[in-house]
Amino acid sequence: MNIAEKFINTHELTKEEYVELIRLAESDVQVREQLKEEAVRLQKKYYGTDVYTRGLIEFTNYCRNNCYYCGIRNGNRNAQRYRLTKEEILDCCANGYELGFRTFVLQGGEDPYYTDEKLAEIVREIRVLYPECAITLSVGEHSKETYRLWKEAGADRYLLRHETASDELYQKLHPAEMKLSERKQCLYDLKELGYQVGAGFMVGAPGQQISDLAEDLVFLKELEPHMVGIGPFIPHHDTRYAEEKAGSVERTLLLLSIIRILLPGVLLPATTALGTMDPLGREKGLQAGANVVMPNLSPVKNRKQYELYDNKICTGEEAAECRGCLSRRVASVGYQLVSDRGDSRM
Ligand code: 5AD
Ligand code: FES
């Protein structure tokens, strides 16, 4: 039995074995195919050919942090900053609801302008207007009390990528004030409060080794998040990593399959970054085991400004309606977009 078969049977390996698994898969196309087939089998077992959508509302690109890889980090003087008003956010929801979205994701930098109470008020309004929709927040690290306030206001889910589970790499990618232990604590707090939680990481982040990815897999198995967002690292021109190589699409697809096998019922998005690196990246993501897409619902006038990395797709006038575009793309590989909250089946 090779390591891939062992993984398929047990859904869990040691860190050293994950390294072996990734190495073997990257050197042997048959192993890659075997993992992909098993991932798709599990995807279909848990979710059929349904693909869930989340309407992404990027409501502020102000951020107090300075993650070295990110285009909207605080130190980037060239970023054109914007904030959506509560009315604009509610307009995005109304438009999204019309289009069939039943999950809204409010994503932004860590922007102190939106105080805990201000954001709670926005969540409360959305909760009253759309009782059958899921509300997801993605606004970084906060205290357990703040997370509790937002949960009581009506938020159901929270996305907070851990970025990398390797202490050393985490410290290389972030300023000293940011700590992996605090990031992990936030994720555990969120789970304890009853949020459906999304973690995740970048593939091909500067300096990332296969052993770092193995650590991500160990951490994911331990955390057991409801959702895992992964995408290739893509350089942004106004960061210290402007000249770095982007993460590989192939490796991202392999990791999607591995994560589907690791946590069979997990929600797994085919991300915008994957679609940016390859025009058919999101379709390939679904065919590797992903079952979620997160089209942009932000006002078209602001989309270019939420620039985490270069050449991000869906930022032009032509992308005013990502849902139609994605629904065709999803159908082209034999899946269908569904209008549903899309809770996890874990
Ligand atoms: N390339 C790819 N993904 C990035 N993110 C931030 N900057 C980049 C980049 N340069 C990801 C991070 C973050 C998510 C919102 O976007 O993983 O958690
Ligand atoms: Fe945005 Fe295709 S998903 S334009």
Image (tube, rainbow, N blue to C red):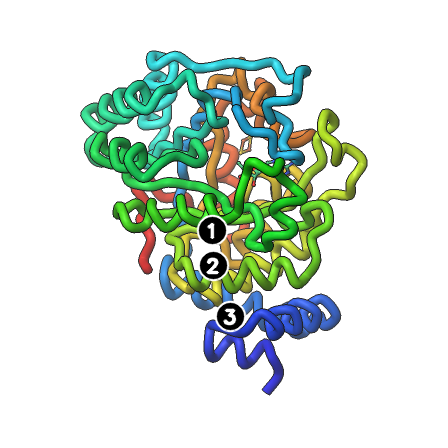
Please tell me whether mark 2 sits on a helix, a strand or a loop.
Answer: helix
The residue that mark 2 highlights is 220
Q: Is residue 64 among the parts visible in the rendering?
A: yes
Judged by depth in the image, the label closer to the viewer, 1 or 3, is: 1
Q: Give the vertical position of 64 relative to 174 (above or below).
A: above
Q: Residues within 10 Å of mark 3 (few under 14, many from 20)?
A: some
Check disc 1 and give the amino acid type: Val
Please tell me whether mark 1 sits on a helix, a strand or a loop.
Answer: strand
Of pointers 2 and 3, the one earlier in the residue sequence: 3
Please tell me whether mark 3 sits on a helix, a strand or a loop.
Answer: helix
Which of the two residues, 319 or 253, is positioned nearer the viewer here? 253
Judged by depth in the image, the label closer to the viewer, 2 or 3, is: 2
| Quarter of the image that includes the C terminus | bottom left
Q: Under 8 Å from ligand 1: the CB of mark 1? A: no
Cα distance, mark 1 to mark 2? Answer: 8 Å
**Residue 33 location, quadrant:** bottom right
Residue at x 60% of width, y 30% of height:
66
Residue 267 at x, y = what percent? 41, 52
Of pointers 1 and 3, the one earlier in the residue sequence: 3
The residue that mark 3 highlights is 38
Quarter holding ligand 1: top right
Q: Is residue 48 among the parts visible in the rendering?
A: no
Q: Residue furthest bottom?
A: 1
Residue at x 28% of width, y 25% of height:
120
Judged by depth in the image, the label closer to the viewer, 1 or 2, is: 2
The residue that mark 1 highlights is 228
Check disc 3 and give the amino acid type: Glu
**Residue 303 location, quadrant:** top right
